[in-house]
Amino acid sequence: MSLLSLPRRALGFCLYLACFFKELWLANLSLAKAVLRYRPEDTHPGFIEYPTAGLSRFEVLILSHSITLTPGTTTVRVADDMSSLLIHAFDARAPSEVREAIQRGLEVPLLRWTR
C-alpha cells in the first residue's frame, strides 16, 4: 500500500461508515414497523446463503459483523473456506432481494474502502 492510497482509503472508510449507518437506520425503522404492526402471517424468517467468494478474510469479517449489527439479520455461520455466509433474516420471503440489499448497501461500499 502506497502513501498515495491512504487518503483514498480514508475517504472510502468514511463512505463505508455512512452507508453502514444508513443501512442501520433503515433496518431499525423496518423492524420497528414490523414489530408495531405485527401479524403472524406477515412474518417470514429464514436462512439465506450469501456468496463471499473473491473477498479477503478481512472483508468477510467486516461484512459478517456489519450484517449482524444490522437489525433483522444475523450471520449464523461463515463457511470454512470463506466462500459464503449463512444469514438468518427476519424477512426472507425474497432471498434474492436480501442478497441484493446486502451487496448494494454493505459489500460495494466495503470494497470501495478496502480495494
Image: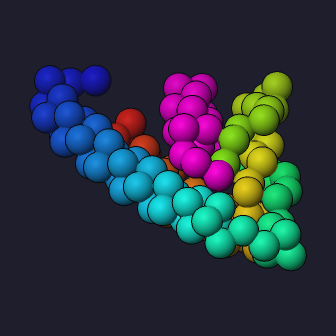
Displayed quadrant of residue 108: bottom left
- The question of residue 48 being in magenta is answered with no
| Span of residues in magenta | 52-72
Between 14 and 28, which is closer to the camera in this rendering?
28
Q: Is residue 15 above or below residue 80?
A: below
Residue 113 picture location, percent across and down: 34, 41
Residue sitting at x 65%, y 61% = 35
The structure residue drawn at horizontal position 58% and vertical position 48%, both measured from the top left corner, is 71
Q: Against 76, is 58 above or below?
A: above
Q: For the C terminus, which image quadrant?
A: top left
Visible residue check, residue 28: yes
Q: Residue 92 location, x and y as percent?
A: 78, 64
Determine the image quadrant of residue 12: top left
Q: Is residue 107 left or right of residue 84?
A: left
Residue at screen point 54% across, 46% down:
70
Q: Position of residue 96 (x, y in %)?
A: 73, 70
The quadrant of the picture occupied by the N terminus is: top left
The front one of 36 and 46 is 36
